[in-house]
Image (cartoon, rainbow, N blue to C red):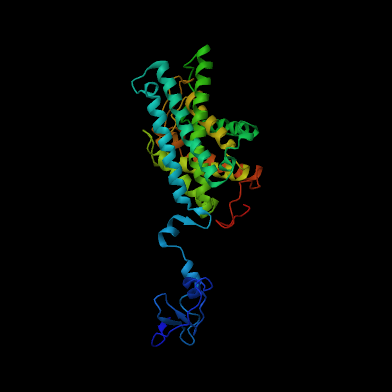
Amino acid sequence: MLVAAGKPEALPQKDKKQEPSQKLRFAEALPGEKFAHEEGECFTLASTPGSGPPLLDSTALRRPPFFHSVFVGPEGLRAAWRILFYLAMAWMVDYVLSFALAPMLSPDLHGKALLLSRLVDYLVQVTAIILPAFVMARIEKREFDVYGLPRHSAFGKFFWVGAIWGIVSITLLLLMMRGAGAFYFGGFALHGIRVLKFAAYWGAFFLLVGCAEEFLFRGYTLYTVTTGMGFWPAAILMSLLFGGVHLRNPGENYVGGLGAALIGFFFCLTLRRTGHLWFAVGFHASWDWGQSFLYSVPDSGGMVTGHLMKSSFQGPAWLTGGSVGPEGSVLVFGIIALLWILFDRVYPQARYPTVSLKEVPTSSS
């Protein structure tokens, strides 16, 4: 503690150029040593016997203010503030592009103009989600590729492998429902060149959907949350958010939201084991394309125009998925469990970029 040492003493005057700064002398003073305040009063740093070192030391003088520690950590700006900054930029880019392209995004459009509007809308979303990550990469002095979409792997092997897994998975789910007497493929709703046109259109559309949703929930945000709490806690958090966002869709229910959260958690596993999101993007796009266009069933509560077949359901909602579609069926949980087991065996090695050890410890699983 700091105590007064009697009456002020007159200290010998020294050349100010040779005298250490008062703050430095104060920090370096030892217990029992006299120290002169700038106004001339003499103090002694002292500690009570048996109570340890003096209460005032150089570390205390260098401790950052409370508000500084709220915003800044050992690696700079804390993860939560970086995510808020990223989301603010994403909102701003989306707002500017939507305003500039307002005539093309009007809700009053019909026919081909409406289909083009939906495609442009998702192109705007992809731009708004990915562009700010390039800015954050420059700010954080990282490569953009660590956020999950490395350019050298774009539409490469893992993308197409993921696409195969996705279309096989939705096919298997519907075959299980067909075996249970809950689903019927029906006849064709499209013929001729229209089949190719709508197949290509919905392929491009769901590719944009896959890129947008995967990078938003498992790209920059997941990487940044990982630096604050570790990969798997971050994966659980972002998967719950992914499922929660799906509950906003018309026709969605809690079973479908839970299914979306679990498939999102599976996508986190694919990210962990492949090191990037291209498998997940391919799976996501082909799963949605298979549901909406190929098999012509509701996807998270929504049907699309220009679908291929006249499919139908029969049976209880817990089996058919009701208004949600196959993602709301209890059978989807078996598919997700099977996906997890198979992927864990095919890709056992973790390849996700490790974060700084100063930020969070990493494991190999």
* Quadrant for the N terminus in the image: bottom left
- Image location of residue 239, percent across then percent down: 48, 45
* Residue 173 vs residue 93, the one in the foreground: 93
Q: Residue at x 56, y 37 (%)?
A: 280
Residue 168's spot in the image, x, y percent?
Answer: 58, 31
**Image location of residue 182, percent across then percent down:** 46, 31
Marks counted in the figure total 0
The residue sitting at 52% across, 80% down in the picture is 30
Closer-to-camera residue (77/195): 77
Toward the viewer: 160 or 165? 160
Look at 54% across and 44% down and name the residue there.
268
Give residue 283's position: percent from left, percent from top.
56, 34
State whether residue 132 appears in this view: yes
Can see residue 301?
no
The extreme left residue here reads 108
Q: Is residue 163 above or below residue 116?
A: below
Q: Quadrant of residue 342?
A: top right
